[in-house]
Amino acid sequence: MKKFLYLLVCLFSYQLASAANEFNLYIGSNYIADSTVKRFDDQNNCTLVQNFFNDNEEMLAKIVAGANGYNTIVATSYAVEELAIMGKIKPLDKSKLPNLKYINKQFLNQAYDPGNKYSVPYAYTPVFLAYNKDKLRQLGIVPDTWAVIFDPKYLNKLKGKVTVFDSSRNVIAAALLYLGKDPNSEKESDLLAARAVIDRAAPYWAKFDSDSYYRGLLRSDVWVSMSYSIDIFKTIQDAKASHAKVNIDAMLQKEGNMYELDNMVIPVFNKDDKLAYAFINMALNPQSAYELSALTGSSVPNDSAVAKLDPAVRNLDWIYPKNMNKMYVFKAYPPKTRILVNEMWTEIKMNGACWL
């Protein structure tokens, strides 16, 4: 009996030690290199556990609802602003982040976090149109404009072959860009104009899809998709590796594009700031940034890392845009605008795409 109790005590102690040695990262999927994770584990005698979310709205909702098991969160621009307003993240002590010196200054001191009080950049992800090159060539369509997913002139040829993100921010921003308006506009008239464009286009779309749209491109079920660079980078690699006949390509749009500038923040409920700073500082290191970009096609705001990349990656305009003046970061909506947009999006989704 004593031996059994001793074993129980040892098992319980081991479980406590294991939990204490876990570092919980809340992040999008496929967004950190395995080699980086291993190096962090080895250097800090811990186990980095990745917890995934698909959309920043989902992440915000969980944090608001009381989720509190994370040591560091990788959140996009407007989500950082909202987390700060809600008092959910800690101000940073940048003296503990010497590798911040490697970050390109154009990605610092953004409007959503002046002076980087709460956040430091991790990576960024352009949003654009990916497409079946052969199908669009046959149709005589060049997807260098958002009109391809909003204008019936194009959609009549593409009905049931287009997907857009299941994301109010991204779809409304694209519609505003198509209309020549500020993609972060809070004006009710602008948002209603974007809503009208979306309502007109939605019956032609196959579905709202942020998670598996790239599979449709691979199968040739979908010919045009609103896309993230990291997804399309991997999809093109998978197509080559499997010798698929489909020819997938991607392109930025002439009206401009959004990019999700993702940042590392420390939540107020984190109990181990030393480990959180160790992770953030390591992620800012050029080697970690290089591993991230080389493996996943993520765009990193780290010039030293970018210089090491294969030119085949570094020169892709939809990963590293040549004209950042036409790339826009999301800003947080004030409460009144957020309510309006949420109501609009619910109605848009209820009307739905054609779901072929």
Image (spheres, rainbow, N blue to C red):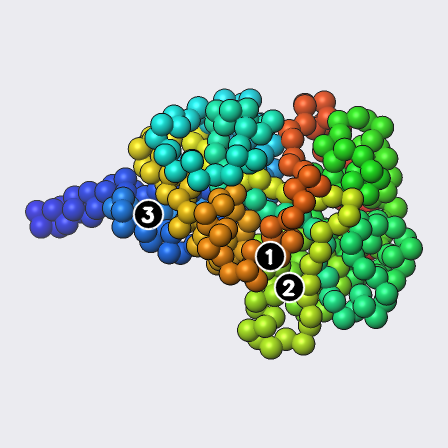
Q: Position of residue 133 (x, y in %)?
A: 74, 67
Which amino acid type is shown beneath numbered disc 3?
Phe
Q: Mark 3 — residue? A: 40
Q: Position of residue 52 (x, y in %)?
A: 49, 47
Q: Position of residue 237 (x, y in %)?
A: 57, 67
Task: Tell me the residue at 38%/25% (across/down).
Answer: 93
Classify 165 as above or below 239: above
Q: Earlier in the sequence, mark 3 or mark 2?
A: 3
> Looking at the image, is mark 3 or mark 1 nearer the viewer?
1
Contact between labelled residues 2 and 3, with CB atoms less than 8 Å apart: no
Task: Tell me the residue at 11%/46% (across/down).
Answer: 6
Which amino acid type is shown beneath numbered disc 2?
Arg
> Looking at the image, is mark 3 or mark 2 nearer the viewer?
3
Crowd rating for badge 1 (residues with CA inside 10 Å; few <14, some 14–19, many 20+): few
Instruction: Give SS at disc 2.
Output: helix
Q: Earlier in the sequence, mark 1 or mark 2?
A: 2
Instruction: Give SS at disc 3.
Output: helix
> Looking at the image, is mark 1 or mark 2 nearer the viewer?
1
Residue 8 vs residue 345, the one in the foreground = 345
Task: Tell me the residue at 84%/62% (across/down).
Answer: 141
Instruction: Give SS at disc 1.
Output: loop
Tell me, yes or no, if residue 58 can be seen here.
no
From the viewer's perspective, is 132 left or right of 155? Answer: left
Instruction: Kindly report the distance in space between the C-alpha atoms of the residues bearing marks 3 and 2.
Output: 32 Å
Q: Which mark is residue 315?
A: 1
Contact between labelled residues 2 and 1, with CB atoms less than 8 Å apart: no
Q: Earlier in the sequence, mark 3 or mark 1?
A: 3
Q: Which mark is residue 215?
A: 2
Task: Tell me the residue at 55%/24% (across/down).
Answer: 114
Furthest toward the left, the residue is: 2
Residue 240 picture quarter: bottom right
From the viewer's perspective, is 228 left or right of 272? Answer: right
